[in-house]
Image (cartoon, rainbow, N blue to C red):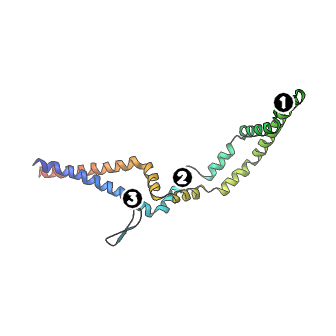
Amino acid sequence: MYYQLILPPITGALIGWVTNYVAIKLLFRPHKPVEVFGYRVQGVIPKRRKEIARSMAKAIEKELLSSEDLAATLGKINWEEEVEKMVEEAVEHRFGSERLSKIPLVGVVSDNIRYHVKYLLTKEIVRRLDSRKEAFASKVREHIDVKEMLVSKIDQLDLMKFEKLLTEFIARELKHLEYLGGVMGFLIGLGQSVFYYLY
């Protein structure tokens, strides 16, 4: 008597969990088409991989990162510090000879020249970079297509890596779907037991 009340919820939970587990696996497997009873079967995601890659890239470009964003970031870069470092290295390499520094008068003149050369070069390079920022940004917008880059990168992934990439983002949600199948199956089985008990 009791097993007739307990068995449906347990069986329902098991069936619900297994059904959802298999359904989730069939999103990705089989990777390549196989013949089953005369029908070609392939996982939904591998079959529509190119469409999914394009949709993902479009969403990323629209919501997260676009050529416009890259161009705007380029415009905000403070070049002065980097230019100073670059000029410092170049000038020290050319004018920082230890032999010159050892000669008293020449050493002082050399230090003075180095300072002025670094100052003038830095200011001139920064000025030119600032005046060309918009041109650089325009080149980025013109030549960098974030969506196509992403589509190409995603499309080059092998199917195992592509599956891993997708599942890493939604691993927890997929597990919840499996458990939800078990819970729904349990509740349906419990309803059957209650119905059987009352009638």
In the rendered view, would you say 106 is above or below 179?
A: above
How far apart marks 1 and 3 lie (CA) works out to 72 Å
| Circle 3 SS class | helix
Circle 2 crowding by C-alpha within 10 Å: few under 14, some 14–19, many from 20: some
- The amino acid at mark 3 is Leu
Please name the residue shown 58% across and 59% down the image: 148
Q: Earlier in the sequence, mark 2 or mark 1?
A: 2
Q: Earlier in the sequence, mark 1 or mark 3?
A: 3
| Circle 2 SS class | helix
Residue for badge 2: 60
Circle 1 crowding by C-alpha within 10 Å: few under 14, some 14–19, many from 20: some
Q: Nearer the viewer, residue 115 or 23?
A: 115
Q: Is residue 51 left or right of residue 72?
A: left
- The amino acid at mark 2 is Ile
Badge 2 vs badge 3, beta-carbon distance below 8 Å: no
Residue 188, image x, y percentages: 23, 52
Closest to the camera, between mark 2 and mark 3, is: 3
Circle 3 crowding by C-alpha within 10 Å: few under 14, some 14–19, many from 20: some
Residue 114: give its label: none
Residue for badge 1: 101
The answer to which quarter of the image holds residue 83 is top right
Q: Earlier in the sequence, mark 2 or mark 3?
A: 3
Please name the residue shown 32% across and 54% down the image: 21
| Circle 1 SS class | helix
Residue for badge 3: 27
Please name the residue shown 39% across and 48% down the image: 173
Residue 68, image x, y percentages: 63, 51
Q: Is residue 46 left or right of residue 113?
A: left
- The amino acid at mark 1 is Ser
How far apart marks 2 and 3 lie (CA) works out to 22 Å
